[in-house]
Image (cartoon, helix red, strand yellow):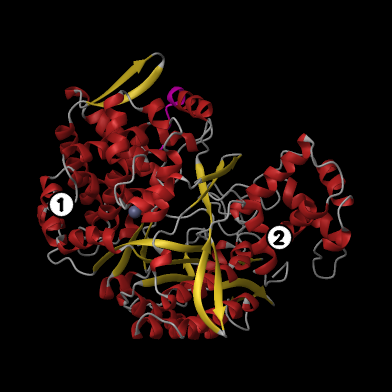
Amino acid sequence: MKTKKIIIASLAIVIALSCSRTKKEDMEQKESFDYVLEQFADLRILRYQVPDFDELNVKQKQLLYYLGQAALCGRDILWDQNGKYNLAIRKTLENIYETYSGNRTTAEFEKFLVYLKRVWFSNGIYHHYSTDKILPDFSRDYFTELTSNSDNKGFPQLQKHSVLETLDILIPVIFDKDVLGKKVNQDPDKDLVAASAVNFYQNVNEKEVTSYYETMKDPDDTTPVSYGLNTRIVKDNGALKEITWKSGGLYGEAIDQIIFWLEKATSVADSPEQLAGIEKLIEYYRTGNLTTWDEYNTIWVSDTSFVDFVNGFVETYSDPLGMKATWESVINFKDLEATKRTKIISSNAQWFENNSPIRDRFKKKEVKGVSAKVIIVSMLGGDCYPHTPIGINLPNADWIRKEHGSKSVTIQNITDAYNEANLGSGFLEEFCYDSVEIELSKKYGLLSGNLHTDLHECLGHGSGQLLEGVRSEDLKNYQSPLEEARADLFALYYIMDPKMIELGLLPNEDAAKAAYINYIRNGIMTQLNRIKPGNEIQQAHMRNRQLIAKWCYENGKDENVIEKIVKDDKTYYRINDFQKLRGLFGELLAEVQRIKSEGDYEAGKELVENFAVKVDADLHKEVLARFEKLHIAPYSGFVNPEYELVEKDGEITDVKIHYVDDFAGQMLKYGKEYSFLPVVN
Ligand code: ZN
């Protein structure tokens, strides 16, 4: 099973007032804090607050500072992984941005700026979500005009090439849709390796890679390492060879910087377990040994320190074969107040499992290893920056999850920022059917959205069991959307349960209604904002949401559970009967669980193909037009705060936090201060 990383659903999930933090000074601070910095193309730049940072002790602050520096040092690794020429292109574009002496007020120059910002946002030339190449809106001629009027000395040079030759190599990579055209190609009719531009493979094809790893795997090994996780594969004299990402190996210059800051962190570690963990991680970065990586994860998963972090080659979404991981980092500390919420949930895990509407033989006899917390992030890096998840569940290795459990987190200050940014955007007024819906969403949307994430992450994915001999891979390409549907349905079914109020997790049933309203509206309608006209739904989380919303709409038609209403040429989906809808969620959960437990590929395929993939063209057009009018971009990302060490007589006495408001400024700063790799690796 892969990591259950929750990405932001869409505006709907997080629209409402914050209920989690009511302290007066926080409220006052929030009022004067601008969450939305700018918007361009399909992207919006936000910033997040780090509440309570000032109240931490100096040792905790120092630890966050050192880990934060380590989080920034791996940035170039991700850029290079995302495409062979990304670093050279970034340095070329930044040199133009800083030294172009021509007219900077023209519409053409504005188009150049938008292109540069899009590349910054995606950590390379491929869209962060669709993985298609981002094509500039300006011509090659204009690009030549830009390069010839910029400081020639500032341009990068590829090995054995002059500046001019380098530009000649980069131009088709930037402008030609067919040259290294897509980062991750999942078309089953193609050679997935050869057709993907991601920089994990050089001069090899899918068949060669697959058989290379097949011979390595031992089917009787119950604790296998994550083969190929931290290497690039190349051909050397006709034979395949792995080059490891480690100190002294590929990306060694950046990894040494990461190690430098991790070593500093050992001096202020939160606990003996954390110290052991950081030392193990350093050992792994020095050796590249995947057994050491597993040992590190085993320590990490049981480490409950107040300050915590992710740093490493973790997620495999960008590898068409799902083995090689991109580099990422998230630095955080516990939101103690909100963590009470997840503690209540996980300590009742067995009750939820026992009362689930699925068949008894698919239930887990004993639920274990659910560790959940709510966190505040202080720094995002690599593949979590600027676009970031709102929930994370790690580690990824199946056997570690089974034997040692997993850690599940909900990121409070990121959902807070999304929520604050969307208030006043006009979204609710546009898509809610009436003022009752608006009020419910405003009052309870954030609270119930966060609870949904908690239930999804810390119970949903872990619930249920496979029948003997069934493997989750049996569902093949339908595995991810069905797995996400299972976790969402679990959350939806229980959020309306009286147990929520009894446990003090929700104040009343209205809060659960807000969750249902937001979910259905998003799943059937507003998430279409992310799809280009004429396209179908590809992304697993989006497929899952439409599957659930559409299935419930269709199957509740006889009793008018969800009603489609057109008012003033605008479409709304209104829930008439919340209890019946809960019943439908339970029914679908039972069926999806059966499909998973029995490995029923055909039934899974039918569900996904019938409800999750196709887009209603007229509704899609309408939704896009309504969003267009509101001017809300479908994707968001964040700038980080900056931190400054305060020293007195050689001692660190404090760490100050500064909130920046300049996206380009942060990108240029990172490009200068945290760039450690040659332009082509
Ligand atoms: Zn999930």
Q: Is residue 658 magenta?
A: no
In this view, the mark in front (1 or 2): 1
**Image point (59%, 52%), residue name:** 122
How far apart are the alpha carbons under marks 1 and 2?
53 Å
Which of the numbered marks, if any, corresponds to residue 504?
1
**Image point (75%, 53%), residue name:** 93
Q: Secondary structure at mark 1?
A: loop
Relative to 223, 284 lies left or right: right
Q: Say which quarter of the image contains residue 519.
A: top left
Relative to 493, 675 lies left or right: right
What is the x, y in percent for residue 201?
A: 61, 66
Relative to 461, 353 lies left or right: left
Q: Which residue is mark 2?
A: 85
Residue type at mark 1 is Gly
**Image point (22%, 40%), residue name:** 511
Residue type at mark 2 is Tyr
Q: Nearer the viewer, residue 512 or 413?
A: 413
Task: Decide which of tag 1 and tag 2 comes sooner along the chain.
Answer: 2
Up-down relation of residue 505 to residue 582 (above or below) = below
Magenta-highlighted residues: 613-619
What is the x, y in percent for residue 648?
A: 55, 81
Q: Secondary structure at mark 2?
A: loop
Q: Say which quarter of the image contains residue 647.
A: bottom right
Looking at the figure, which quarter contains the C terminus? Answer: bottom right
Q: Nearer the viewer, residue 339 or 647?
A: 647
